[in-house]
């Protein structure tokens, strides 16, 4: 069994990795709100080469505020968002923490795009929070 395993809601898409996440955070940007149907999405970034993915993932591309092209990967059957990529960080894939079989295994360490947060979307106040993307 890999260290981290997960997949979409219907099980058609599965992923696994033995790597440790490079970072993990919550994102409260409007894309994450609309894509997740909630106040934020919670993701962990891994080197793409360490992640094995099975099943068909459909990617949707858009121009991010940074000017980079961002892609969100969904299961075409159940619609779950499982993965994200950006041209700003090539070779890195962000996996949805809630897609893990055990989402408690990775704890988000920071909050992105807090400037877009809804007043009702309360996250751990002790986490560092950034109005947009954190400085890289
Ligand atoms: Zn699915
Ligand atoms: Zn976001």
Image (tube, rainbow, N blue to C red):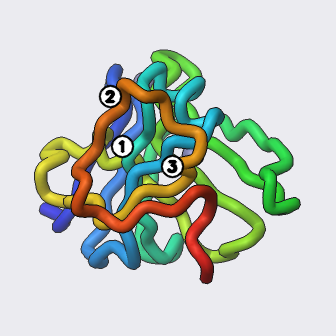
Q: Which mark is residue 118?
A: none
Q: State the SS at label 1.
A: strand
Nearer-the-camera pick, 61 or 77: 61
Q: Is residue 57 visible?
A: no
Instruction: Say left or right for 69 vs 22.
Output: right
Going 87% across and 60% down the picture, which residue do you hit? 67
Among the two numbered marks 2 and 3 on one chain, the one whose residue lies closer to the N terminus:
2
Q: Nearer the viewer, mark 3 or mark 1?
A: 3
Q: CA distance from mark 3 to mark 1?
A: 30 Å
Q: How many marks?
A: 3
Q: Quadrant of the C terminus?
A: bottom right
Camera-side residue of 119 and 111? 119
Which residue in the structure is indicated by mark 2? 11
Residue 25 % position (x, y) = 38, 59
Closer to the camera: disc 2 or disc 3?
A: 3
| Residue located at (48% from left, 76% from top) | 47
* Residue 74 seen in render: yes
- In the picture, measured across the screen, residue 32 lies left or right of residue 15, that is right
Q: Kindly indicate whether the residue at mark 2 contacts the one at mark 1 (C-beta within 8 angstroms).
A: yes
Q: Which residue is mark 1?
A: 14
Q: Where residue 24 appears, x then y in whole percent?
A: 36, 64
> Where does residue 93 sit, x and y in percent of width and height?
53, 63
């Amino acid at each position: 069994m890999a260290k981290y395993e997960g997949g979409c809601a219907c099980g058609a898409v599965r992923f696994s990795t033995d790597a440790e996440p490079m970072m993990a955070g919550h994102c409260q940007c409007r894309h994450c709100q609309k894509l997740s149907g909630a106040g934020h999405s919670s993701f962990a970034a891994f080197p793409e080469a360490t992640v094995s993915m099975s099943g068909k993932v459909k990617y949707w591309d858009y121009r991010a505020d940074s000017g980079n092209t961002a892609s969100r990967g969904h299961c075409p059957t159940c619609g779950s968002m499982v993965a994200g990529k950006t041209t700003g960080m090539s070779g890195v894939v962000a996996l949805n923490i809630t897609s893990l079989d055990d989402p408690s295994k990775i704890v988000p360490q920071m909050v992105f795009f807090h400037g877009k947060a809804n007043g009702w979307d309360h996250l751990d106040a002790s986490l560092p929070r950034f109005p947009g993307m954190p400085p890289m």
